[in-house]
Each structure stands twice: as structure tokens, then as C-alpha cells.
Amino acid sequence: MNHLIPDSKGLDPAVLKEQLFKLWRSNDLQSLHLAAQEGFSELNDPLEAFLTILECAPSKQKARAHTLGVHIVKEFQSWLKEHPQVTLTSLPEQQATALKHRALALLTDNQTSFVEALINIYQLTTLDAATLRLHVVKLLPLKCYKETAVLGIKLNLQNELNLEEVCVPLIFQDKLSLAEAFVTGHVHLEQQLVSLLDSWCHPNFSVQDMISKKFPHLSLSKRCLAQTQPKMLTKHVFRLAEKFKIDQGQFPNALHKRRQDTLRFLMFKRFVNKSMTDENWSDHVQTVVADDRELQIQLVEMLLKYCDPEKAARWSLRYNLPRHRLPFVVWNTQLSLSPEQQHATNATHSEEWTPSEAHCQKFYQPPLSKEKVQYVDTLEALQSCRDALLKKGSVVGVDMEWQPNFGCSSAQQVALIQLATFDTVFLLDLCANGFCQHPETTAFIRSFFSEQNLLKLGYGMTGDLKCLKSTWPQFVEEPLKTEGLLDLLNVHRKIQCGKVNSAQCGPKEVLVGEDSAEKGLSLLVQQVLGKALDKTEQMSDWKKRPLRVSQIRYAVTDAYCLLDVYSVLSGNPANFGLPSDLRSLTQTEKNGDAKQKDKKNKKINPTSSKEECQGAQWVSPPCSDTEKGLLCGKEPTEDSPPAPLAPQQLRVVCDNMLQGLGRYLRCLGVDVVILENDDDHRVAAKLAQAEYRVILTCGQPYQTLRSQVGEGRCLSLDCSEKARDQAMRVLRHFNVRPTPCDIFSRCQACNSDQYVALTRQDMIRMLKQKGFLQATYSSPTPPVEEPLYLELPRYGPQCKWASLSDLNPVTLSFPGGAPIQLHTVPPTLVPRVPHYFVCTRCGKVFWEGSHFGRVLSMFKGVMHITDEDVQ
């Protein structure tokens, strides 16, 4: 290395720069380090010379990690640590100010890589705010919005910059998190950002109009437009409002939109899914609609669509809606109602504690009489509860209920706590006046959860403990200590890893997530005890008093079943693939084991590409013995590649960035749940846990989702790939070999695999019945020979086939409520197509066409095609 010889005025910065440049070009970083440290010491004015070198450094505008400028900055920072006497304060004020301006110019040009170093070395935050702003706003015409925001944050210029000019382009570039960081800590800006997003939730808001008027230079992709849909915006508004502690009154549009969506959800639960009682539905509707006139009118319109005019008329009278805002049929029905009918409400009837025999045969029942249920709403009752529970060696089932808020508020406060022993169930009524926040109640909760010698059983206790913090804010200031807590959700996850052998504990073997409508605790109870839980009252109004008998029975059952499940599992843990000590199955240990297995698997199979699998393994629900190694999370080796899977054996959930991938996989017979645009990515984790699915995701959610599901059950894909290429990657990763018989074996719209077959004559009759064909329509001319029998499609063996007798002959709808989508059948198609196949879940109509050949051609590289298929 050539020695650097300074002249009488010190070393020339240009000479040092050339020397460093040669070493950098030759990639001799060790020599560059030594030359830089020696050279900086020989400079006459290091602070000024450093800027001169940076201004002349190659590729300084790119400011990437490998450029010379970045290396020089790092070396100068290291040199300054050894020479703390070199500071701006040692220079004359005029010279120091000039250096600050030169450093500021570098910030503007260099984007963000030099920001931290130059701001700290040259103390740029001490410059006048107007001067800083003048330099930063120069980036806006250059469309450097990210750099403007970062510099604004680093230089504390948020109050000097226009929020809309900086943040609106960031939002449309899918950088809302940066806009969020820009306003954080500035109350008025936080409120301004929430108000801005809320204004976009207004029904009359148009993204295109706003862009054309205020930001004509912005170009929007389809993905950016999807991020500004009202549902997605509403989610962001509520999240930011919770983070910034902003009152709901400041985002009325988002609140109205959330309530509107909730109303649609309640209508679905009551009249389509039929999983909510009329009483629970009525309670929630009144809470959601409240005094919002527009929602009241929408409620009446929805009732007219989902049920009968009489019910719609009664609700219109309840809210005294004006005549000119009502459909004519509702107003006309009002006139025909008697006074008794006009004021009719949900009839209340006395309930028996013991349910019907049919109910008992279908659902799990706790072996307790009503007298064994004690209501705790006074301090005297609380003392009796304390004496009964806080005993060494006791086992207590713990559950909690709270008012469903359907996302309209962030804080969910507990309304009822159930504490079950084998003899008694205590119901702590936190809605009782003065009881919840009484010091003795708070002290009892602390002592109960902190008692190490008291085994407390729960299921998914994370959510319960979160709601406890919302109920008692003091548990946030002074954290609630939890000891002796066994979350049976962890036990359930362990059971999911292997085949469940519950023949001795129930009427039949039940596999997690396989052909079962049950989820969560209900599924665990079904697995272990043979009967599921009745979840009808789960979404009750738990703050309304008095509680109904059915609500009390539900609350008691949810807590007591934990005791029975624990008794069976702890009595014979090996039968369920569990360790002898169930308490060892803690979440912490589980995550630790997963990390160790991840490291081990990376060593076993170093050829797995990060882009393809990112730690995902070959997993699926436990099935036959031949698939056990593949489907129980064991990584295949090169000597023993994984056995091929049928598409029906792979069950996945695609996040909303991979909807195209999900549709392709459905085409090939894979069981796919696809998230909607407004679904949070955490929904994927819940579905994966409840139904034992593999998550297919991309981008930032991967790490979060991977930590929430079992080992190997999250696969990250490249968003830049086409959906067809992503599908090929997934099929190869899991070694799925579709056959031509698998194509279209699932409904592409709803994922169902059950169809009903219709002949041409059936279709003509139905089209005439609904007015899509004229009554005078006659058979095709020339006559088409009708087949002697109804021929199923090629994918027939892979599907379930329902009987046409299940169809409602009047409404032409299936038992689930979905009508046949007759409007999608072109009348000109009828003479040419002899058979039709209708999905029984959504009513979509399919027929044989050319689409099959296109799909077969697209995926022939992964298809298993036999000679028979070729013929």
C-alpha cells in the first residue's frame, strides 16, 4: 500500500479519495480500512475534507451498502470515536454553519443511507426549521416521497411539512406504515391522518377524482386501488384510532361502514347460516343500528330481502321511519297489521334447565343441576367463592364471556367469568353495579391467577387475559401474574401433530379438521368426549341482564367441559400422543422446540431454496400410515422423496395477496380457503389452527403467521410471480400430482365439492319457472336426441353428489339457502348442452366446455396422465 504523505497544509482530500477509490475497486477492504484511518488523521480539517470526499465519491446518489461512499461514512464514524476532540463546536460558527449546509445538500441528494451519520456528525437538527424544510421539500417534485418522509422524521420536520403532500402518495404506494411513523408522537397529525382516511370511507368518495385533482402525477396500480377500498380503509382507521387513542366521534364514516358490514353479517348469521337465535339477533341489531337513521332504513330493506314484509314492517314501526324512505310493500304491510302485530316483540318463554333429549344426545352436557351454579355479584358471594376455590391442589376450569363488538370498538371488557370445579360452577357477574372495580374483586382476580398450587384450565387463554387487561387497566400498569395455568389449546395442538386414537373415549375416531364442522374447544371436546359443544349462545348479548337460562347453561358448559377433557387426557395421555405431564406443553417450550427443529431441518436439507419454502415443511392432516411420514411434519430426504399426494389431501388457506393462486389450486381439486380483500392476515392463522390448513402467503405477514401456527405450516411465495407459476411451485413443493379427473372437482367460487346434476329438461323447466325463458319456449329445432341416462362429468368420482329432491321446488334454493344462479345460463346455450352441474353451497352452474382443455394444457407439467386419460 502506498503511504499517504501530507503536505504542509495537510493531506489533500482528493488524494485520499483516489487512494480509497483504488482500494475499493480492488475489493481490498482491509487495506481500505487502514488507509482511511491513517488518512483521516493526516487531514488538516477532517470535517470539511470528509464532505469533499463524499461529494466526489462514485455512486453517491445510489447510497447502497456496497458503494464507496457508504464505506467512507462507516470508516469516518469509526475514526471519530477515536478522536472525540473533532467536533463542530471546535470550529468558528460561520464555518460550522457552512459545513451544515453542505451536509444537508448531501442528505437531499443521497436519499436515506447517509442520514443518521450526517445528522449526528454535523448536528443538522440545530439548523433553522425553515432552512431544513426548504431542502427537504425539493424531493417532492422528484417523487421521492419515501425519502421526504424519512428525512422529515429524522429532522423533526413533521410540523413543517404538509401531511397530505407527504402521506397521500405514501399510502397509494402501499407505505401506510411509513405515513403512520411520520405522524406518531404528534397528536394533531395523528388525528389528521385518521380523519383523512376516514374521509375516504365516505360512500361518495372517489379515489380517481381525488388523484386527478390533487395528485395528477401519481399512477395507481390495481393493488394500490385495492388498498383504498372502504373495507380495507375502515380496518386501518380502527387500528390507528386504537393506537393513537382517538375517540370514535372523529371517524364517523369508518364507524358507519363497520356497522353496515356488521349488519350484513348478522343477517347472514340469522337468515342464511341460521346459527343465531332470533333473540340474540334482535339484541345485536338494536345495538349496531342504534339511532343511525340510514342503518335503520337499510335494516328494513335487508329484512324485506331475507324474510317477509311483515317483519320488515314491524321494525320500520319500531324506528318510526318516514313513509317516503320505505319500500311500498313495507308501507302497505304496515297498514294491514293489527295493533297487536304492530307492537309485537320477541316472545319470551320460560326455559327448563335440562334441555331436550335430542339436544342431550347431540351435544355435551355437564353433570350438574341448576342448584350447583352459584351467581357471584356481591362481596359476600365472592368470599364464599374464594373459600371454595383457593385450596391447594384444586383444579378449576376457567372461561370468560364478553359482549361481541364486531370490530366497532377495540376494547372488549369481560362481562362474565366462569370458574368451575367438579362440584360447583361460580359465575362472576362483572356487570353488577359496583362489583367489578371493587378492590376486593380485583384482589381476588390477582390472587386466583397467581396461585401456583391451583391448576387453572383454559382454552386459548391469550384472548381472555387480553380482555382482562381491558376490564382492569391496573393490570397493565402492574401486570397480572399468572401461575399454574394450563392452556388446553397447546394440548390440542399437540394432538393435531399425530393421529388421534379416541376409540375408547368416544363413539368414533375424529381427526382434527377432517370432515368436521366443529372448531376450537368444541372440536377438542368432540375428539375427547365424543360430543361437541352447542355454540348457539356464543354470540349472545352478555351484558344484558338478567341472563337467560340458555346463556347460563352455555357459560357453565364451556367452563365445566375443561375439567372432563383434562380428566380423560391426564388419565391416558399416551392414547392421544401426549406426554405424561400435560403441564409440560407450554407455549414457550413449544416455540423453542419449533426453532430447534427448524435449525435441524435446514441442516438436513440444505438444498431447499429460501424463495420456495422459507422453512415450510411437508405437512398435512394426519391420514393413513403410508402418508404418516409425509403428513406429520417430517422432512423428506433425497433418498426417500415424499410420496405423491392427491389434491384432496392438501388443505390450504391463501391470504388476500394470493387470490389468483387460490383459484388455480381450486381448479385442480385442492381444498382452498381464500381470504377476502378486507380480511386481516391473522384470519389465516385462525383458519390454519382450527382446520389444520397450510398457510400460503407472501411478503411481510410471513414471519407473523409462521409464529402463530405449527411447524412447517406456512409457505412464503414470490408475489412477483404469475399465479400459474405460483401454483406450479406449490404443487411441486408438496408433491401433489393432479389427474384430469381432479380438474373442476371443486367449485371455483366457494370451494365446495358437492354438486347436483341437472338434465337439459330440468334446466329448461327451471329457466321458465323463473322467467329466464319464455313459457312458449319449445325444444330445439332440429330436435336434439336426449341421452338415455344422466352422465356425470369426468370429475364425478372426486365429488359428492346431492339429490335433486333436496332442492326447494318453489324457490329453487338448496337447504343452505343458496338459489341456483339461473341468470348465468345463456338461453342460447340450452340447445347445445345436455347436462348441467350445480354447486349446492353457492348455486353456481357449470357445464362441460373448452375451459378444461386450457387448464390441462397449463398444468400438464405436474399432471399425472395415464394412457386411459389420453384416450
Image: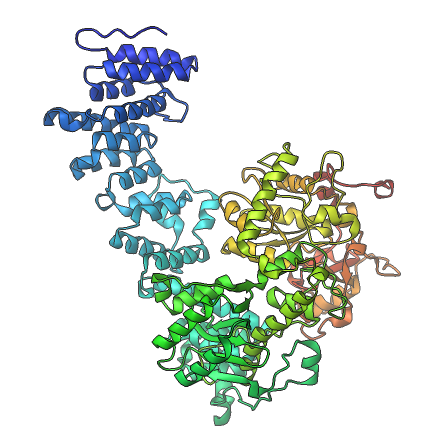
Q: Does 219 sit left or right of 490 as displayed? A: left
Q: Can residue 511 be seen in this view?
A: no
Q: Does 108 sit left or right of 710 as displayed? A: left
Q: Residue at x 62, y 39 (%)?
A: 600
Residue 5 placement (x, y as % from top left): 26, 6
- Residue 363, located in which quarter of the rendered image? bottom right
Residue 754 placement (x, y as % from top left): 73, 61
Q: Which residue is drawn at 78% across and 68% down?
A: 803
Q: Does 750 sit left or right of 148 as displayed? A: right
130, 746: nearer the viewer: 130
Q: Which residue is drawn at 59% across and 78% down?
A: 422
Residue 51 placement (x, y as % from top left): 24, 21
341 w.r.t. 230: above or below: below
Residue extending farthest to the front is 392
453 w.r.t. 114: above or below: below
792, 155: nearer the viewer: 155
665 w.r.t. 467: above or below: above
What colour scheme governs how the chains and residues are painted in the rendered image of this protein?
rainbow
499, 444: nearer the viewer: 444
**Quadrant assignment for the C terminus:** top right
**Quadrant assignment for the N terminus:** top left
Q: Can residue 797 be seen in this view?
A: yes
Q: Residue at x 29, y 26 (%)?
A: 77
Residue extending farthest to the right is 788
Residue 800 placement (x, y as % from top left): 77, 61
205 w.r.t. 661: above or below: below
Q: Does 415 sit left or right of 35 as displayed? A: right
